[in-house]
Image (cartoon, grey):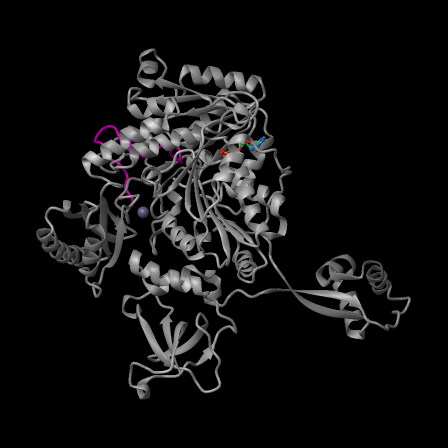
Amino acid sequence: MFAKIIIDQDAKALDREFEYIIPEGMQVLVGERVLVPFGPRILQGFIVGITEKSEFDASKLKPIKEKIEDFAVIKPEMLSLMFHMADKLHLKLASCLRMFLPSEMRTDKIKELVVHFCRLAENFEMPSAKAKKQIEVVEFLKQNGREKRSVLAEKFGASAVAALIQKGVVILEAEQVDRVPEFDVLKSEKKQLTALQQRAIEEISENKTYLLHGVTGSGKTEVYMNLIERELGKGKTALMLVPEISLTPQVLANFKARFGEQVALIHSGLSAGERFDEWRRIFFGQARVVVGARSAIFAPIENLGIIIIDEEHEQSYVSESNPRYDTHDIAAFRRSYNNCALVLGSATPQLESYAKAIDGEYQLVEMPVRVNGLEMPKITVIDMLMEMRHGNNNIFSIPLMVELKEIVKAKKQAMIFINRRGFSSFQRCRNCGYVAKCSDCDVSLVYHRFENRLKCHYCGKRFHALDVCPSCGSSDIKQGAIGTERVVEELHKMFPDVPVFRMDNDTTSVKNGHRKILNEFRSAKPGILVGTQMIAKGHDFEDVLLVGIVDADQSLFQSDYRSIERTFQLITQVAGRAGRSANQGKVFLQTYSPRHYVYRFAANYDYKGFFKREANLRKVTKFPPYARIVRILFSHEDEKVVAQECKECYEKIKEIKEKNAEDFVYLDVMKAPVNKIKNKFRYQILMRFTLENADALEKQIYDSVDKKAKSSIFFEINPNNLS
Ligand code: ADP
Ligand code: ZN
Ligand code: ZN
């Protein structure tokens, strides 16, 4: 017998199946991991097929060396998914498989956690009266039956316990225990459903894809939980994705309260051991509800009854590093494989999804009002140029300051949103215009006040802050636009006694960082939370009555076809944090372009109006979802190599374009906007074509990429980020 094996190496040359002989007496299954000789090395591989006849000269094949586990780590569904991803997303087979296992399993560093318990032997001799500690241990075990060795050692001393074990008075029992991630449990009584929730649950009844368009505070979480409950009742399982870990403490707490031990949690903030144990609980069917961030879409859960993607518009569902994928595509595959329902939920669906709902590809389910008929918070658009003309050069407009004072007086809470971490965006010389840049990446550095350092947000490298301009020697250095740190500093000046919290990438990078900040904020009354996008997401604080958006334009003027859509989503989501329980909230949106249509639609909560306008624009200008953008990104240390290889590829695509001239809207080759990251130069081919022949064209273009090129090559479809 022969096995078809994929070698667990992320290399273009190894991206295919290799055949090995299954040695006499070795029982293997498809999906198992094995060690195989490969050249002079022994490598890990996955068995993806077993055949009786080899396509090759059997005398040239080598035998499998040994098995790694005694069970198939890759289940049949995931194997199909691998082939699907390789084919549709142009990914390497091994890099797909790697997504399906906790990375720790491949490095062999992580083991099951074994805990030693002590119990008394059946017939034991009481220790002599002199050994007081030992007698205490025996008494304790008589009372309590069994206890962890570590606990006994701490209580009574390690030597007493060791002596008892040695004499055979105490018996040691080893047991594998699961490491369970920390979480808060909220009290979450089952709520009497509103009529809208009830209707939504009834409508979501078939094995289809649903777009649940529900305004912020319409009670989508409760709908999800009821849907999951229904599936569990049928003996099925559920997978629920949330955008980022900043969200999971609350959602998870709710889910743990409702579903208890059946819930498993997967996100990048877990320790290696926790991740491994949660994965095992899912794999072996102990956990029937998986809640997690993007990578949880690859959880080895079987018998799915429902997949939910909460806040489906979030960019974090798109993986922008290798392997590049969009969670929506993987979810669509798993939905169809399991023949189950897929629910995409959002107050601001991505344009692509809403367009599909209108075309009937998805079924639209709407929840247009908040729970208990609560009003949406009133959004006031503030013209910051007018503020300046009236002599206010502060970060905060007068109306926002007035409201902040009211909130503090009433011991309520406010959130201030600013789309940039750090103190200010950059340092610029006023004399000559010099801006400090990273030495390894082609980007400006961001000033961080607390550390008094300039940081590169692409590679993390730190640099001394500027005192004098290295270019002209002037000491007239200006801080650019403001960031979170600066806002916190201003608030401290205004309200020295009010706790102000900061939530951004800097303050949440420690384990459980989000949870800590959110928990502290929850009990601070009055309290103010300042943050980046992270605070826009799904949080539900009943005393937040005011939201300030300090610089709404930040996301508007980026050279990206989705920047207006993103701005609309951000405003709606941030605004949605206000007034979620009894009182109506207020939102102040500060902008230098108050007449931009995005603010008009956002201030009126007019998603449909915005969609119409934006969709029309995309149709006319031929942008996704009404066209396809493909970017091929080349990167390499040697600029000559990458420029050359990129150019060669471009020439081939130009030929394809000539044959399909009517399909192409655009094709060009250029340096990537960020020309260098971590000392690797980046070049790109950018193209756009209409949808009629898009799949066929995409395949032709992919095939034209030289698989032997020295550069790393990334193939991106409708990329989120064109830096
Ligand atoms: P969304 O995700 O749609 O923004 P949430 O699911 O966070 O909204 O719900 C908003 C608030 O309404 C939460 O505090 C939630 O506990 C509450 N809620 C949801 N459903 C009900 C209900 N049927 N009755 C009372 N309160 C509800
Ligand atoms: Zn200068
Ligand atoms: Zn850098």
Q: Nearer the viewer, residue 176 or 666?
A: 666
Tell me if residue 539 can be seen: no
Q: For ligand 1, give the image quadrant.
A: top right
User: Does the segment drawn in magenta span residue 436?
Assistant: yes
* Image: 105 above or below 517: below
Residue 139 placed where, x, y %?
86, 61
Left/right of residue 523 with respect to residue 501 in the rendered view: right
Left/right of residue 134 with respect to residue 551 in the rendered view: right
User: Does the segment drawn in magenta span residue 198?
Assistant: no
Q: Nearer the viewer, residue 424 or 324?
A: 324
Residue drawn at x 42%, y 47% as measured from the top left: 208
Q: Which residues are magenta?
A: 419-438
Tell me if residue 523 can be seen: yes
Q: How many marks?
A: 0
Residue drawn at x 29%, y 82% as measured from the top left: 56
Left/right of residue 381 with respect to residue 109 in the rendered view: left
* Image: 629 above or below 530: below
Residue drawn at x 38%, y 60% as measured from the top left: 81
Residue 530 placed where, x, y %?
47, 30
Q: Nearer the viewer, residue 476 or 140?
A: 140
* Image: 424 above or below 700: above
Left/right of residue 242 with respect to residue 704 in the rendered view: right
